[in-house]
Amino acid sequence: SGDPVERRGRLTLVLALATLVSAFGSSFQYGYNVAVINSPAEFMQQFYAATHLERHGRPMEDNLLTLLWSLSVSMYPLGGFFGSLMVAPLVNKLGRKGTLLFNNIFSIVPAVMMGVSEIAMSYEIIIAARFLVGICAGLSSNVVPMYLGELAPKNLRGALGIVPQLFITIGILCAQVLGIRHILGNSTGWTLMLGLTAIPAALELLVLPFFPESPRYMLIQRGDEKTAQKALQRLRGWDDVEEELSEMRLEDQSEKAEGRLSVLSLLSQRSLRWQLVSIVVMNMGQQLSGVNAIYYYANSIYASAGVKLDDIQYVTVGTGAVNVFMTIAAVFIVEASGRRLLLLCGFGICCAACVLLTVALSLQDSVAWMPYISITCVIVYVIGHAIGPSPIPYVVTTEMFRQSARPAAFMVAGSVHWLSNFTVGLVFPFMERGLGAYSFIVFCVVCLLTLVYIWLVVPETKNKTFLEICQMFASRNKVEIKLGDGELPLKERSAPATAL
Protein backbone atom coordinates (compact mmCIF):
# COMPACT_ATOMS: atom_id res chain seq x y z
CA SER A 1 0.00 0.00 0.00
CA GLY A 2 1.42 3.37 -0.99
CA ASP A 3 -0.16 4.87 2.10
CA PRO A 4 2.67 5.71 4.53
CA VAL A 5 0.45 7.51 7.03
CA GLU A 6 -1.38 5.00 9.18
CA ARG A 7 -4.85 6.33 9.92
CA ARG A 8 -5.53 6.61 13.62
CA GLY A 9 -8.85 5.08 14.57
CA ARG A 10 -11.32 7.64 15.86
CA LEU A 11 -14.12 7.40 18.38
CA THR A 12 -17.15 7.15 16.11
CA LEU A 13 -20.71 7.46 17.40
CA VAL A 14 -21.40 3.74 16.91
CA LEU A 15 -18.25 2.78 18.84
CA ALA A 16 -18.97 5.25 21.65
CA LEU A 17 -22.59 4.11 22.03
CA ALA A 18 -21.69 0.40 21.92
CA THR A 19 -19.15 1.10 24.68
CA LEU A 20 -21.62 3.02 26.84
CA VAL A 21 -24.49 0.56 26.41
CA SER A 22 -22.44 -2.55 27.17
CA ALA A 23 -20.61 -0.89 30.06
CA PHE A 24 -23.78 0.51 31.63
CA GLY A 25 -25.78 -2.66 31.04
CA SER A 26 -23.17 -5.07 32.39
CA SER A 27 -20.25 -3.46 34.23
CA PHE A 28 -22.41 -0.94 36.10
CA GLN A 29 -24.42 -3.81 37.59
CA TYR A 30 -21.24 -5.51 38.75
CA GLY A 31 -20.15 -2.45 40.73
CA TYR A 32 -23.65 -1.78 42.02
CA ASN A 33 -24.00 -5.29 43.41
CA VAL A 34 -20.56 -5.17 45.06
CA ALA A 35 -21.60 -2.27 47.28
CA VAL A 36 -25.38 -2.56 47.45
CA ILE A 37 -25.37 -4.91 50.44
CA ASN A 38 -23.13 -2.66 52.53
CA SER A 39 -25.34 0.14 53.81
CA PRO A 40 -28.61 -1.76 54.46
CA ALA A 41 -26.67 -4.53 56.25
CA GLU A 42 -28.23 -3.96 59.68
CA PHE A 43 -31.80 -3.89 58.29
CA MET A 44 -31.21 -7.05 56.30
CA GLN A 45 -29.81 -8.76 59.38
CA GLN A 46 -32.88 -7.65 61.34
CA PHE A 47 -35.00 -9.24 58.60
CA TYR A 48 -32.99 -12.48 58.82
CA ALA A 49 -33.49 -12.57 62.59
CA ALA A 50 -37.20 -11.73 62.40
CA THR A 51 -37.78 -14.41 59.77
CA HIS A 52 -35.99 -16.99 61.91
CA LEU A 53 -38.02 -15.97 64.96
CA GLU A 54 -41.29 -16.30 63.06
CA ARG A 55 -40.39 -19.75 61.74
CA HIS A 56 -38.90 -21.35 64.80
CA GLY A 57 -40.36 -19.28 67.62
CA ARG A 58 -36.93 -18.59 69.14
CA PRO A 59 -34.36 -15.86 68.43
CA MET A 60 -31.47 -16.60 66.08
CA GLU A 61 -28.02 -17.27 67.58
CA ASP A 62 -25.36 -14.71 66.75
CA ASN A 63 -23.13 -17.32 65.14
CA LEU A 64 -25.86 -18.38 62.73
CA LEU A 65 -26.59 -14.77 61.84
CA THR A 66 -22.90 -14.11 61.16
CA LEU A 67 -22.73 -17.25 59.03
CA LEU A 68 -25.83 -16.33 57.00
CA TRP A 69 -24.54 -12.81 56.54
CA SER A 70 -21.10 -14.02 55.40
CA LEU A 71 -22.90 -16.27 52.93
CA SER A 72 -25.00 -13.38 51.62
CA VAL A 73 -21.83 -11.39 51.00
CA SER A 74 -19.56 -14.15 49.72
CA MET A 75 -22.07 -15.99 47.49
CA TYR A 76 -21.52 -13.07 45.12
CA PRO A 77 -17.81 -13.69 44.36
CA LEU A 78 -18.50 -17.43 44.36
CA GLY A 79 -21.09 -16.88 41.65
CA GLY A 80 -18.52 -14.70 39.91
CA PHE A 81 -16.11 -17.63 39.86
CA PHE A 82 -18.72 -19.89 38.22
CA GLY A 83 -19.57 -17.09 35.80
CA SER A 84 -15.91 -16.93 34.76
CA LEU A 85 -15.88 -20.66 34.04
CA MET A 86 -18.77 -20.14 31.60
CA VAL A 87 -16.98 -17.40 29.64
CA ALA A 88 -15.13 -19.46 27.04
CA PRO A 89 -17.95 -21.80 25.97
CA LEU A 90 -20.46 -18.94 25.82
CA VAL A 91 -18.39 -16.37 23.90
CA ASN A 92 -17.36 -18.99 21.35
CA LYS A 93 -20.91 -20.28 20.93
CA LEU A 94 -23.00 -17.08 21.18
CA GLY A 95 -20.41 -14.46 20.33
CA ARG A 96 -19.38 -11.55 22.55
CA LYS A 97 -22.53 -9.51 22.07
CA GLY A 98 -24.75 -12.59 22.28
CA THR A 99 -23.21 -13.53 25.63
CA LEU A 100 -23.86 -10.05 27.04
CA LEU A 101 -27.53 -10.31 26.03
CA PHE A 102 -27.91 -13.86 27.36
CA ASN A 103 -26.21 -12.78 30.59
CA ASN A 104 -29.10 -10.51 31.53
CA ILE A 105 -31.15 -13.57 32.53
CA PHE A 106 -28.73 -13.83 35.48
CA SER A 107 -29.54 -10.28 36.42
CA ILE A 108 -33.29 -9.89 35.92
CA VAL A 109 -34.24 -13.19 37.63
CA PRO A 110 -32.26 -12.49 40.86
CA ALA A 111 -33.44 -8.86 40.88
CA VAL A 112 -37.04 -10.08 41.00
CA MET A 113 -36.09 -12.70 43.62
CA MET A 114 -34.47 -10.09 45.88
CA GLY A 115 -37.40 -7.73 45.36
CA VAL A 116 -39.95 -10.29 46.62
CA SER A 117 -37.75 -11.78 49.39
CA GLU A 118 -39.39 -9.70 52.12
CA ILE A 119 -42.94 -10.56 51.05
CA ALA A 120 -41.96 -14.24 50.79
CA MET A 121 -40.36 -14.02 54.26
CA SER A 122 -37.31 -15.94 53.08
CA TYR A 123 -33.64 -15.08 53.43
CA GLU A 124 -32.68 -18.17 51.41
CA ILE A 125 -34.03 -16.38 48.35
CA ILE A 126 -31.59 -13.50 48.95
CA ILE A 127 -28.62 -15.84 49.30
CA ALA A 128 -29.56 -17.74 46.11
CA ALA A 129 -30.12 -14.46 44.26
CA ARG A 130 -26.69 -13.19 45.33
CA PHE A 131 -25.18 -16.32 43.78
CA LEU A 132 -27.05 -15.80 40.49
CA VAL A 133 -26.22 -12.12 40.27
CA GLY A 134 -22.61 -13.15 40.95
CA ILE A 135 -22.70 -15.34 37.83
CA CYS A 136 -23.89 -12.26 35.93
CA ALA A 137 -20.98 -10.23 37.30
CA GLY A 138 -18.47 -12.99 36.57
CA LEU A 139 -19.54 -13.15 32.95
CA SER A 140 -19.77 -9.41 32.38
CA SER A 141 -16.48 -8.57 34.11
CA ASN A 142 -14.76 -10.75 31.50
CA VAL A 143 -16.91 -10.35 28.40
CA VAL A 144 -17.29 -6.56 28.33
CA PRO A 145 -13.50 -5.88 28.23
CA MET A 146 -13.15 -8.61 25.59
CA TYR A 147 -15.95 -7.19 23.45
CA LEU A 148 -14.68 -3.60 23.69
CA GLY A 149 -11.04 -4.62 23.16
CA GLU A 150 -12.08 -6.30 19.91
CA LEU A 151 -14.26 -3.40 18.72
CA ALA A 152 -11.67 -0.70 19.43
CA PRO A 153 -8.94 0.46 17.04
CA LYS A 154 -5.54 -0.19 18.60
CA ASN A 155 -4.88 3.45 19.56
CA LEU A 156 -8.11 3.57 21.60
CA ARG A 157 -7.95 0.05 23.04
CA GLY A 158 -6.56 1.11 26.42
CA ALA A 159 -8.96 3.99 26.93
CA LEU A 160 -12.04 1.96 25.97
CA GLY A 161 -10.74 -0.98 28.00
CA ILE A 162 -10.91 1.16 31.16
CA VAL A 163 -14.52 2.25 30.53
CA PRO A 164 -15.96 -0.98 32.07
CA GLN A 165 -13.91 -0.33 35.21
CA LEU A 166 -15.18 3.26 35.21
CA PHE A 167 -18.78 2.03 35.14
CA ILE A 168 -18.00 -0.45 37.92
CA THR A 169 -16.88 2.48 40.10
CA ILE A 170 -19.96 4.50 39.08
CA GLY A 171 -22.11 1.50 40.05
CA ILE A 172 -20.41 1.37 43.46
CA LEU A 173 -20.99 5.10 43.92
CA CYS A 174 -24.68 4.80 42.95
CA ALA A 175 -25.18 2.00 45.47
CA GLN A 176 -23.48 4.13 48.15
CA VAL A 177 -25.64 7.16 47.39
CA LEU A 178 -28.89 5.16 47.28
CA GLY A 179 -27.82 3.51 50.53
CA ILE A 180 -27.91 6.79 52.46
CA ARG A 181 -30.39 6.38 55.33
CA HIS A 182 -33.11 8.72 54.14
CA ILE A 183 -32.99 7.50 50.51
CA LEU A 184 -33.19 3.68 50.37
CA GLY A 185 -30.81 2.47 53.07
CA ASN A 186 -33.61 1.92 55.56
CA SER A 187 -35.95 -0.81 56.76
CA THR A 188 -38.51 -0.19 54.00
CA GLY A 189 -36.28 0.64 51.04
CA TRP A 190 -33.68 -2.11 50.99
CA THR A 191 -35.64 -4.67 48.92
CA LEU A 192 -36.22 -2.03 46.25
CA MET A 193 -32.53 -1.13 46.39
CA LEU A 194 -31.52 -4.76 45.78
CA GLY A 195 -34.02 -5.11 42.93
CA LEU A 196 -32.91 -1.98 41.03
CA THR A 197 -30.14 -3.98 39.33
CA ALA A 198 -32.74 -5.12 36.77
CA ILE A 199 -32.98 -1.63 35.21
CA PRO A 200 -29.57 -1.55 33.43
CA ALA A 201 -30.16 -5.17 32.34
CA ALA A 202 -33.51 -4.31 30.76
CA LEU A 203 -32.00 -1.30 29.01
CA GLU A 204 -29.16 -3.40 27.58
CA LEU A 205 -31.62 -6.06 26.34
CA LEU A 206 -33.55 -3.40 24.44
CA VAL A 207 -30.65 -1.45 22.94
CA LEU A 208 -27.58 -3.68 22.47
CA PRO A 209 -29.11 -5.84 19.66
CA PHE A 210 -28.81 -2.82 17.32
CA PHE A 211 -25.02 -2.74 17.64
CA PRO A 212 -22.47 -4.84 15.70
CA GLU A 213 -20.94 -8.07 16.98
CA SER A 214 -17.15 -8.09 17.39
CA PRO A 215 -15.68 -8.10 13.85
CA ARG A 216 -12.72 -10.22 14.98
CA TYR A 217 -15.12 -12.86 16.25
CA MET A 218 -17.12 -12.80 13.00
CA LEU A 219 -14.04 -13.11 10.79
CA ILE A 220 -11.71 -15.37 12.77
CA GLN A 221 -14.15 -17.62 14.59
CA ARG A 222 -17.19 -17.54 12.29
CA GLY A 223 -15.31 -17.10 9.01
CA ASP A 224 -17.94 -14.56 7.98
CA GLU A 225 -15.96 -11.86 6.20
CA LYS A 226 -18.98 -9.92 4.85
CA THR A 227 -20.46 -9.27 8.30
CA ALA A 228 -17.03 -8.48 9.74
CA GLN A 229 -16.42 -5.90 7.02
CA LYS A 230 -19.85 -4.30 7.52
CA ALA A 231 -19.31 -4.15 11.28
CA LEU A 232 -15.87 -2.56 10.87
CA GLN A 233 -17.22 0.03 8.44
CA ARG A 234 -19.92 1.00 10.93
CA LEU A 235 -17.45 1.12 13.83
CA ARG A 236 -14.74 3.11 12.03
CA GLY A 237 -17.00 5.43 10.08
CA TRP A 238 -15.17 4.88 6.77
CA ASP A 239 -15.43 2.33 3.96
CA ASP A 240 -11.83 1.32 3.51
CA VAL A 241 -11.21 -1.16 6.32
CA GLU A 242 -8.93 -3.39 4.25
CA GLU A 243 -5.85 -2.78 6.43
CA GLU A 244 -7.57 -4.00 9.61
CA LEU A 245 -9.20 -6.92 7.80
CA SER A 246 -5.83 -8.05 6.47
CA GLU A 247 -4.33 -7.85 9.97
CA MET A 248 -7.17 -10.11 11.16
CA ARG A 249 -6.61 -12.55 8.28
CA LEU A 250 -2.94 -12.65 9.20
CA GLU A 251 -3.85 -13.48 12.79
CA ASP A 252 -6.34 -16.06 11.51
CA GLN A 253 -3.63 -17.79 9.42
CA SER A 254 -1.17 -17.68 12.23
CA GLU A 255 -3.71 -19.38 14.47
CA LYS A 256 -4.69 -22.01 11.95
CA ALA A 257 -1.02 -22.91 12.02
CA GLU A 258 -1.22 -23.31 15.80
CA GLY A 259 -4.79 -24.59 16.23
CA ARG A 260 -7.59 -23.59 18.60
CA LEU A 261 -7.05 -23.50 22.35
CA SER A 262 -8.90 -24.86 25.32
CA VAL A 263 -7.89 -23.92 28.86
CA LEU A 264 -5.80 -27.07 29.22
CA SER A 265 -3.88 -26.51 26.02
CA LEU A 266 -3.49 -22.86 27.01
CA LEU A 267 -1.80 -23.96 30.25
CA SER A 268 0.54 -26.30 28.43
CA GLN A 269 1.55 -24.01 25.56
CA ARG A 270 5.12 -22.73 25.67
CA SER A 271 4.42 -19.70 23.48
CA LEU A 272 1.89 -18.34 25.99
CA ARG A 273 3.60 -19.27 29.24
CA TRP A 274 4.72 -15.82 30.41
CA GLN A 275 1.55 -14.08 29.27
CA LEU A 276 -0.42 -16.54 31.37
CA VAL A 277 1.77 -16.15 34.46
CA SER A 278 1.51 -12.37 34.04
CA ILE A 279 -2.28 -12.20 34.00
CA VAL A 280 -2.52 -14.60 36.96
CA VAL A 281 -0.08 -12.45 38.98
CA MET A 282 -1.85 -9.22 38.01
CA ASN A 283 -5.31 -10.51 38.88
CA MET A 284 -4.13 -11.95 42.20
CA GLY A 285 -2.32 -8.70 42.94
CA GLN A 286 -5.41 -6.69 42.08
CA GLN A 287 -7.65 -8.58 44.52
CA LEU A 288 -5.22 -9.66 47.25
CA SER A 289 -3.86 -6.12 47.59
CA GLY A 290 -6.91 -5.66 49.78
CA VAL A 291 -9.00 -3.19 47.82
CA ASN A 292 -12.21 -4.93 48.91
CA ALA A 293 -11.00 -5.07 52.48
CA ILE A 294 -10.42 -1.32 52.37
CA TYR A 295 -14.00 -0.76 51.22
CA TYR A 296 -15.19 -3.23 53.77
CA TYR A 297 -13.09 -1.69 56.51
CA ALA A 298 -13.60 1.96 55.55
CA ASN A 299 -16.59 2.41 57.87
CA SER A 300 -14.77 1.08 60.91
CA ILE A 301 -11.63 3.07 60.08
CA TYR A 302 -13.72 6.21 59.80
CA ALA A 303 -15.55 5.33 63.01
CA SER A 304 -12.30 4.87 64.93
CA ALA A 305 -11.10 8.11 63.36
CA GLY A 306 -13.87 9.84 65.26
CA VAL A 307 -16.22 10.52 62.34
CA LYS A 308 -19.78 10.67 63.70
CA LEU A 309 -21.81 7.55 62.98
CA ASP A 310 -24.37 9.44 60.93
CA ASP A 311 -21.67 11.09 58.82
CA ILE A 312 -19.81 7.89 57.94
CA GLN A 313 -22.17 7.18 55.04
CA TYR A 314 -21.28 10.55 53.49
CA VAL A 315 -17.54 9.98 53.87
CA THR A 316 -18.02 6.58 52.19
CA VAL A 317 -19.80 8.28 49.29
CA GLY A 318 -16.84 10.68 49.15
CA THR A 319 -14.41 7.77 48.84
CA GLY A 320 -16.59 6.32 46.07
CA ALA A 321 -16.56 9.65 44.24
CA VAL A 322 -12.74 9.85 44.42
CA ASN A 323 -12.63 6.36 42.91
CA VAL A 324 -14.84 7.39 39.96
CA PHE A 325 -12.87 10.57 39.42
CA MET A 326 -9.47 8.81 39.36
CA THR A 327 -10.74 6.12 36.98
CA ILE A 328 -11.87 8.87 34.59
CA ALA A 329 -8.34 10.26 34.83
CA ALA A 330 -6.92 6.82 34.01
CA VAL A 331 -9.01 6.66 30.80
CA PHE A 332 -7.17 9.74 29.56
CA ILE A 333 -3.72 8.86 30.90
CA VAL A 334 -3.51 5.24 29.73
CA GLU A 335 -2.84 5.94 26.04
CA ALA A 336 -0.28 8.62 26.85
CA SER A 337 1.73 7.08 29.67
CA GLY A 338 1.14 3.44 28.80
CA ARG A 339 -0.02 0.46 30.81
CA ARG A 340 3.20 -0.51 32.54
CA LEU A 341 3.83 2.87 34.17
CA LEU A 342 0.28 3.06 35.56
CA LEU A 343 0.53 -0.45 37.02
CA LEU A 344 3.88 0.30 38.66
CA CYS A 345 2.75 3.66 40.08
CA GLY A 346 -0.56 2.24 41.26
CA PHE A 347 0.90 -0.74 43.12
CA GLY A 348 3.66 1.51 44.51
CA ILE A 349 1.13 4.02 45.91
CA CYS A 350 -1.00 1.23 47.41
CA CYS A 351 2.07 -0.32 49.03
CA ALA A 352 3.10 2.97 50.65
CA ALA A 353 -0.48 3.73 51.74
CA CYS A 354 -0.75 0.34 53.47
CA VAL A 355 2.46 0.92 55.44
CA LEU A 356 1.33 4.38 56.53
CA LEU A 357 -2.13 3.10 57.39
CA THR A 358 -0.64 0.41 59.65
CA VAL A 359 1.47 3.02 61.45
CA ALA A 360 -1.50 5.38 61.76
CA LEU A 361 -3.86 2.71 63.06
CA SER A 362 -1.41 1.48 65.68
CA LEU A 363 -0.77 5.04 66.95
CA GLN A 364 -4.47 5.91 66.76
CA ASP A 365 -5.12 6.16 70.49
CA SER A 366 -1.93 7.90 71.57
CA VAL A 367 -1.78 10.73 69.01
CA ALA A 368 -4.76 13.01 68.63
CA TRP A 369 -4.45 13.87 64.91
CA MET A 370 -3.60 10.31 63.76
CA PRO A 371 -7.18 9.46 62.70
CA TYR A 372 -6.99 12.05 59.95
CA ILE A 373 -3.84 10.37 58.65
CA SER A 374 -5.80 7.08 58.53
CA ILE A 375 -8.56 8.66 56.44
CA THR A 376 -5.97 10.22 54.13
CA CYS A 377 -4.29 6.83 53.72
CA VAL A 378 -7.55 5.19 52.74
CA ILE A 379 -8.20 7.87 50.12
CA VAL A 380 -4.62 7.73 48.79
CA TYR A 381 -4.90 3.94 48.59
CA VAL A 382 -8.16 4.24 46.61
CA ILE A 383 -6.51 6.73 44.23
CA GLY A 384 -3.52 4.42 43.71
CA HIS A 385 -5.72 1.41 43.04
CA ALA A 386 -8.00 3.33 40.67
CA ILE A 387 -5.25 4.46 38.30
CA GLY A 388 -3.55 1.09 37.81
CA PRO A 389 -4.34 -2.15 39.61
CA SER A 390 -8.13 -1.88 39.18
CA PRO A 391 -8.55 -1.12 35.47
CA ILE A 392 -5.34 -2.19 33.70
CA PRO A 393 -5.32 -6.00 34.18
CA TYR A 394 -8.45 -6.28 32.01
CA VAL A 395 -6.89 -4.16 29.27
CA VAL A 396 -3.70 -6.18 29.33
CA THR A 397 -5.52 -9.54 29.36
CA THR A 398 -7.24 -8.52 26.12
CA GLU A 399 -3.95 -7.40 24.61
CA MET A 400 -1.62 -10.23 25.56
CA PHE A 401 -3.57 -13.01 23.85
CA ARG A 402 -4.65 -13.61 20.30
CA GLN A 403 -8.16 -14.40 19.20
CA SER A 404 -8.24 -18.16 19.79
CA ALA A 405 -6.53 -18.02 23.17
CA ARG A 406 -8.42 -14.99 24.46
CA PRO A 407 -11.58 -16.68 25.83
CA ALA A 408 -9.50 -19.31 27.65
CA ALA A 409 -7.21 -16.59 29.00
CA PHE A 410 -10.13 -14.54 30.30
CA MET A 411 -11.46 -17.69 31.90
CA VAL A 412 -8.20 -18.22 33.79
CA ALA A 413 -7.88 -14.52 34.69
CA GLY A 414 -11.51 -14.34 35.78
CA SER A 415 -11.34 -17.47 37.93
CA VAL A 416 -8.21 -16.19 39.67
CA HIS A 417 -9.83 -12.78 40.14
CA TRP A 418 -13.02 -14.13 41.71
CA LEU A 419 -11.36 -16.80 43.83
CA SER A 420 -8.99 -14.17 45.25
CA ASN A 421 -11.95 -11.86 45.81
CA PHE A 422 -13.84 -14.65 47.60
CA THR A 423 -10.78 -15.46 49.73
CA VAL A 424 -10.33 -11.84 50.86
CA GLY A 425 -14.03 -11.56 51.72
CA LEU A 426 -13.91 -14.75 53.75
CA VAL A 427 -10.51 -14.41 55.43
CA PHE A 428 -10.35 -10.68 56.12
CA PRO A 429 -12.79 -10.57 59.05
CA PHE A 430 -10.69 -13.22 60.83
CA MET A 431 -7.43 -11.48 59.89
CA GLU A 432 -8.77 -8.24 61.31
CA ARG A 433 -9.64 -9.96 64.59
CA GLY A 434 -6.27 -11.69 64.84
CA LEU A 435 -3.86 -9.07 63.48
CA GLY A 436 -5.80 -5.84 63.96
CA ALA A 437 -3.99 -2.91 62.36
CA TYR A 438 -1.20 -5.18 61.14
CA SER A 439 -3.44 -6.98 58.64
CA PHE A 440 -2.55 -4.25 56.13
CA ILE A 441 1.10 -5.35 56.21
CA VAL A 442 -0.05 -8.51 54.40
CA PHE A 443 -1.58 -6.38 51.66
CA CYS A 444 1.54 -4.25 51.51
CA VAL A 445 3.66 -7.36 50.84
CA VAL A 446 1.28 -8.47 48.06
CA CYS A 447 1.54 -5.04 46.39
CA LEU A 448 5.31 -5.12 46.62
CA LEU A 449 5.64 -8.59 45.10
CA THR A 450 3.27 -7.74 42.26
CA LEU A 451 5.18 -4.54 41.60
CA VAL A 452 8.51 -6.39 41.37
CA TYR A 453 7.02 -8.96 38.98
CA ILE A 454 5.56 -6.29 36.67
CA TRP A 455 8.85 -4.40 36.73
CA LEU A 456 10.77 -7.50 35.63
CA VAL A 457 8.38 -9.21 33.22
CA VAL A 458 5.48 -7.19 31.83
CA PRO A 459 6.31 -5.21 28.66
CA GLU A 460 4.56 -2.04 27.45
CA THR A 461 1.67 -3.04 25.15
CA LYS A 462 0.48 0.44 24.20
CA ASN A 463 -0.39 0.95 20.52
CA LYS A 464 0.89 -2.47 19.37
CA THR A 465 -1.12 -4.90 17.25
CA PHE A 466 -2.07 -8.18 18.90
CA LEU A 467 0.52 -10.03 16.78
CA GLU A 468 3.37 -7.66 17.70
CA ILE A 469 2.61 -8.19 21.39
CA CYS A 470 2.83 -11.93 20.83
CA GLN A 471 6.23 -11.41 19.27
CA MET A 472 7.49 -9.35 22.19
CA PHE A 473 6.79 -12.35 24.41
CA ALA A 474 8.12 -14.89 21.90
CA SER A 475 11.76 -14.36 22.88
CA ARG A 476 10.98 -14.65 26.59
CA ASN A 477 9.00 -17.83 25.91
CA LYS A 478 11.89 -19.07 23.71
CA VAL A 479 9.63 -19.87 20.73
CA GLU A 480 9.08 -18.75 17.15
CA ILE A 481 5.63 -17.45 16.20
CA LYS A 482 4.30 -19.31 13.16
CA LEU A 483 2.49 -17.12 10.65
CA GLY A 484 0.91 -19.77 8.44
CA ASP A 485 1.71 -20.92 4.90
CA GLY A 486 2.67 -17.67 3.19
CA GLU A 487 4.96 -16.59 6.06
CA LEU A 488 3.67 -13.06 5.58
CA PRO A 489 6.24 -10.81 7.19
CA LEU A 490 4.97 -8.35 9.76
CA LYS A 491 5.33 -4.88 8.34
CA GLU A 492 7.02 -3.69 11.53
CA ARG A 493 10.04 -5.92 10.93
CA SER A 494 11.48 -3.48 8.42
CA ALA A 495 11.24 -0.55 10.83
CA PRO A 496 14.24 0.16 13.06
CA ALA A 497 13.65 -1.56 16.38
CA THR A 498 13.89 1.48 18.63
CA ALA A 499 10.33 1.29 19.90
CA LEU A 500 11.09 -1.75 22.03
Image (spheres, helix red, strand yellow):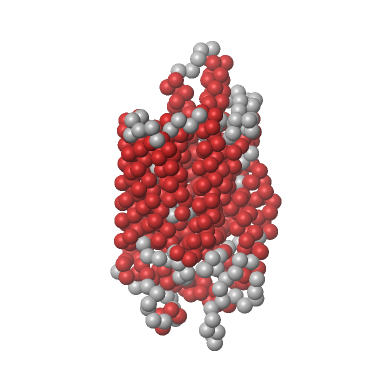
Q: In this view, does 495 lie to the left or right of 226?
A: left
Number of numbered markers = 0
Give the percent coordinates (x, y) of residue 249: 51, 74
Q: Vertically, is 457 above or below 204?
A: below
Give the percent coordinates (x, y) of residue 271: 35, 66
- Does the image show residue 139? no
Identify the residue shown where x is 44% and y is 64%: 338
Identify the residue shown where x is 37% and y is 65%: 459
Decide which of 370, 98 is in the foreground and name it.
370
Give the percent coordinates (x, y) of residue 226: 63, 71
Decide which of 296, 208 is in the foreground and name it.
296
Decide which of 173, 280 is in the foreground and name it.
173
* Quarter that holds the C terminus: bottom left
Identify the residue shown where x is 41% and y is 43%: 377
Q: Residue furthest front?
A: 368
Identify the residue shown where x is 62% and y is 35%: 193
